[in-house]
Image: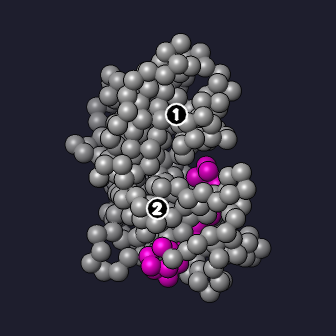
Amino acid sequence: MKRPFRQVDVFAESPHGGNPLAVVVDAAGLSGADMQRFANWMNLSETTFLLPPTDDGADYRVRIFTPVAELPFAGHPTLGSCRVWLDHGGVPETDGVVVQQCGAGLVPVARSDRLLAFRAPPLIRSGPVDDATLAGAVDQLGLERADVVDAAWIDNGPGWLGLMLADAESVLAVTPGPVDEKIGIIGAHPAGHEAAFEVRAFFGKDGMTVEDPVTGSLNASAAQWLLGSGRAAAPYLVTQGTALGRAGRVHISTDDDGAVWVGGNVTTYIEGNVEL
């Protein structure tokens, strides 16, 4: 069966500078195994599948797959899926806000003239990192313990461990070895830079270390950590993907209730049909 298909670039303000996402628009009738097989074949960070919602409070439902597993939530798939749903004729119940249903629950996505932004979901794990885990993460990244200014669990679903380094230059200099944890590293840019922080995201796959180009879930949980600890003030801009030759730009803001919103541009580059 042929199904509408889009491939979009998320968190990029220049062509092909962000994180690509494959989206199957009408996934009704596909099994989880079907979806996983296609995501594995696409071999992108994530592939998503749009479905009718099963929650009355949602506008659409999405299932999110890496090449090897389904995720309850991920950031760039949320923005990319929302953009495709809107472009394919989706009309939200509430003007200006789309409500996505995913494994993590309901995620509001706000629309502006240029950007989409999702409200950061609550952390499911936070707080200090035990010494053994921290020592392992430091070793995996080729760092010394003294290189880490602070560390915390900042897990909103994927399992992120956050490490704060001295500055953005230190973040860009990291050359990791084999990585077991999902590790995000963060460092502040100097005054006058367009962005406040540089972020990088690493995880293991098939015995290899993979760096994600631009990561919405990590930036969401990192923002909650940075803002909560007083290391950042919203709004601010994050650069990510620099070490990979990408130009990711992630916009962090807060609302009157103190909720964190993670925004970025989404551009469609491939559209057509896929046989599934």
Label 1, residues with CA under 10 Å away: few <14, some 14-19, many ≥20: many
Query: Which dot marks residue 11?
Result: none
Question: Do residues under tags 2 and 1 come within 8 Å of each other at their CB atoms?
Answer: no
Instruction: Please identify the quadrant where the C terminus is shown.
Output: top right
Q: Verify whether residue 102 appears in magenta.
A: no
Give me the residue at 71% from left, 61% from top: 180
Query: Residue 103 occupies which quadrant of the picture?
Result: top right
Picture coordinates of residue 60, whole percent (x, y): 46, 27
Q: Can residue 130 be seen at all in this image of the molecule?
A: no
Query: Residue 181 occupies which quadrant of the picture?
Result: bottom right
Determine whether the residue tagged by mark 1 lies in a helix, strand or loop.
Answer: strand
Q: CA distance from mark 2 to mark 1?
A: 23 Å
Q: In this orientation, which residue lies closer to the viewer: 39 or 161?
A: 39
- Indicate which disc, 2 or 1, sits on the residue closer to the N terminus: 1
Give me the residue at 55% from left, 74% from top: 174
Residue that badge 1 annotates: 48
Q: Verify whether residue 161 appears in magenta.
A: yes
Q: In this orientation, which residue lies closer to the viewer: 12 or 192?
A: 12
Picture coordinates of residue 21, whole percent (x, y): 46, 40
Q: In this orientation, which residue lies closer to the viewer: 68 or 231?
A: 68
Residue 192 vertical placement versus 207 (above, below)? below
Picture coordinates of residue 132, whole percent (x, y): 77, 73
Q: In this orientation, which residue lies closer to the viewer: 26 or 204?
A: 204
Residue that badge 2 annotates: 244
Determine whether the residue tagged by mark 2 lies in a helix, strand or loop.
Answer: helix
- Name the kind of residue labelled 2 in the image: Leu
Q: Which contiguous range is marked in magenta?
A: 155-172
Frontmost of labels 2 and 1 is 2
Locate residue 125 relative to residue 244 in the image: left or right: right
- Name the kind of residue labelled 1 in the image: Thr
